[in-house]
Amino acid sequence: MDYPTLLAQATVNGLVIGTMYMLMAVGFTLVFGIMRVVNFAHGEFYMLGTFVAFFTYAQWELPFIVALAAAALCIGILGALVERAVIQPFRTDELSGMIATLAVSVIIQNGAVLAWGPTPRSMPNVIDGVLTIGPFTFPWSRLLVIAAAALIFAAFWFFIQRTRIGRAMRAVAQDTETALIQGIRVNTIYPIAFGMSVALAALAGALMAPIFSVSPFVGLTPMLKAFVVVILGGLGSVPGAVVGGLLLGLIESFTATLFGSLVADILQLLLVILILLVRPWGLLGQKEA
Amino acid sequence: MSRKTLGYAAAAAGLVLAIAVPQLTANQFYLHLANLALLNAIFAMSLGLIAAVGQLSLGHAAFAAIGAYLSALGAMQLKIPPILGIVLAGLVTGLLAAALGRVILRLRGVYFVLVTFLVGQVCTLVALNWESVTRGANGLVGIPPIRVFDQALGSRAYFYYAALTAFATVFVFIWALMRSQYGRAFRSIAENIQLAESSGIDTSRYQVIAFALGSGIAGAAGAAMAHYIRYISPDTFTFHDSVAYITMLVVGGRQTLVGGVLGAAFLTPLPELLRGLEGVQHIIYGAILLGVLLFLPGGLASIGKRVLRRKKGVETPT
Amino acid sequence: MKRLLTAALLPAACAIAIPAAQAETLKIGVLATLSGAGTAWGMSMQGAADLAAEDVNGKGGLEVGGKKYKIEVVAYDDKYKASDALTAINRLAFDDRIKFVVGPVGSAPALAILPVSTENKVITMTMGFTPKALSPDYKYSFRPVLPSDVFSDPQIKWVVEKLGGKRIGGLFPNDESGQQVAAANEKAYEAVGAKFVAKEFFERERVDFVPLLTRVLAQKIDAFELDGNSPQTAGLLVKQLRELGFKGPIIRTGGDATADIVKIAGKEATENVYVHQPIDLSSPAIQQYTKRFEDKYKIPLNAFSPFFYANLQMLFEAMRKAGTVSDTDKIRDAMLALKDFDTVLGKVNWTGQAQWKSNQQLDAPFYVALIKNGAPVVVAKCTPAKCE
């Protein structure tokens, strides 16, 4: 393979993982922006999304679009319930809330092992075959991820910008007290926001399930990446999560292709630590008072 | 009896009992668990020291790993006696933490948590990939046991006394520290850092001190663990261990020094009660953690206080 | 206070965990990974112990020295960690007073427990592939599964001679097995005139291999080596390699992964894939064992399981011959004296003197298969000396 081919492959691949990181990070950052909660269980909701997709698409052979809808809906509702039960009591205590999500993550992951066993499962591709343009080959299954993720994000953006609940969410994120005065019911906004956030993670999981694999342990990596992305883009900033996600995907793909895995991993961590130290509010985030 | 005398009496009774443990049980397995509980208590107490300035470290296991590797390598390559190695490992880890802390303690709250988490990831990567020194994923095999007066403390009973001494030392040290002007400064920083700053406390200095001391103690305890298990690899101290220390601290009680000890004493033998329920065991852990957070924010340590308070409430009218 | 708590809780713990011991019960320990990502391996070992116990108990018990013993399996989780394995072996040795342990799984737990098991004369059957798990210092450490340094030489020689490839590429996990396997493979390939032109390591958390595979393929390789990767990773690698347009042979030198490779990558992608088969899937004994295991646990059989079962068959025979269930020195000698012993794997022996100065490595035949239309077809039968 020559350099142009190598670079083209790296770009497409970077976009694929970049969009996955983006979906994970957008949800993660949304919850932080609105509720000031760092959700250590975020990856477990991704994992649950892969299982919903596995059962609906691979097992019951429903159309993939139904699998996506099921993942978003089931996991979204579950997320809202989790928020009400174990996150809401810690509204004023960031650290306790974070420890609570650690506990939730342990429970979900081991619950999944009990219910579905530890052995990874695999799913058939949604589309088979490759797209060949000149010397370049791109699997359709990967191109589909990019398109689907872009659509999902567009829908989310529309919701946040144009609907009443979306506007209320943004108001709460900006200033909870003012929002309260304006008559926004924070207690209903929080579960909805949390549910939406984990629904995005579940969608990412459902999209990636055919490409990667399905097991109770697949949540860790996407969560780690979501951390990296939100720090890169700025905790609480949705545009930051989009830019950060795509950027991280591309950086990772190029460094791994050109220099190998170790360089890619270490570079990422160092980049993030550096950002935290010189610009803790991230590339696109706002400096806190 | 005042609460103070009660406390001293309890401490003395506990110490006498602890010293007698190897005489009370011939079962080596119980001694092994006691050893692990003592080390875990040190980890939890040292994490509590960092929590005393209002910071939560998710990289505590990484400092334990640094100490463990330092002391193990020192003993294997440079023939440093393990006892000296453990102390040195604690000091070096503490200095490293101080240097790092000067930079990362500018961050607070979740930012600090995230950066300590990432520091932990970097440490694991280094241990895995710096093969010429750490032997990579294969780990260090055959780490020498602790020796005192040319007597190898390989046996569990000997190690027990060494661990008990270390535990008592750390306990008394942190207890004294928290009652000194340092402890007062720590508490005011945890309560309100802006207020502490404006009342003339050098907040960054005190935070660095707490972080360096806590991480240094963890490094020494990690080193002791390495000489006890006599094997260490990048898997020995991971993110999951950091979470385990946090769990012990929270379940035992974050506010008091006894809390970490109670948490370690309760959670270390717990898996042994749950043998045979392998899958459920972790879920029970998570549930206990969640339950304590929701219904007993002061942890196990606050049970005693609650009982005492209730008693007093009954006694006052008479 | 904490001492009190520990002292109060533990006897209670043991009372719950272990039913009152009967005079004629023989306890076998299992020390394996029963939670987390390594559970499939741990289950394969626990399954071997459970099934072996069922066999014996079904016949009314194991007759040794005129007494009949019912076998009871006591299983502890090591969470794939050295420190937890050490706790478990302490409990097995001192609390349960067990002398026979199936386990542990990984090299780290194996190395951590061996001093304790040796000191207490506990016979262990490990799945730790580290060369250090067998040594004259560890008199009671046995290994029923073949590590790659035993089989990679003959198998790689056979494959390279057949295919004639010179430029080999490979991707290995950056963990203990990956690091060991990569070194062993590289040596074996160089010994027969081939060369690793692209060898990459990745951290265990990595899920996307396309960037690394792109990098490997850029070296214009003739064949790709899959050894050292978990079955699922191996499947993903085959799938992604074919998607990137690689049509050359893919070789899996060690570990059973065929079922997962086919399941994940699909029939089309798995043509021209040469795999290591630790067991002969067409043998009736293996097929029967597979059925029993899968009926009981509802999970696919891991090919390592019958090796532990075979080792237990040998252990029971050795107890009968030695006429004792407690003197592990005699049992060890009787077990090592078994030659061409008939097990679920066929006839087996002991080997290992040359490599580790310890003749406690199980010696069983293994196979090379070519995947055709989604199923492995055995193309060569191997011994540690050669494949044909």
Image: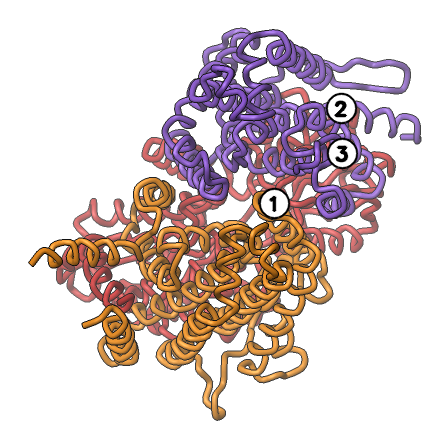
Q: On the image, numbered disc 2 is attached to which residue?
A: A15
Q: Nearer the viewer, residue B230 or A25?
A: A25
Q: Amino acid at mark 1?
A: Leu
Q: Is residue C360 above or below residue A23?
A: below
Q: CA distance from mark 2 to mark 3?
A: 19 Å
User: Could you say where residue B79 lies in the image, as x and y percent from the top left?
Assistant: 63, 83
Q: Colour of chain B?
A: orange
- From the rendered image, report the letter of the chain displayed in red: C
Q: Are marks 2 and 3 on the same chain?
A: yes
User: Could you say where residue B43 lies in the image, as x and y percent from the top left?
Assistant: 47, 63
Q: On the image, numbered disc 3 is attached to which residue?
A: A283
Earlier-in-chain disc, 2 versus 3: 2
Which of the 4 image quarters holds residue C129? bottom right
Which of the 4 image quarters holds residue A236? top right
Q: Report the mark closest to the observer, 1 or 2.
A: 1
- From the rendered image, report the letter of the chain displayed in purple: A
Q: Is residue A82 left or right of residue C267?
A: left
Q: Report the mark closest to the observer, 3 or 1.
A: 3
Tell me the quarter of the image containing the N terminus of chain C.
bottom left
User: Could you say where residue B34 lies in the image, as x and y percent from the top left?
Assistant: 34, 69
Q: Are marks 1 and 2 in contact (CB under 8 Å)?
A: no
Q: Which mark is residue B114?
A: 1
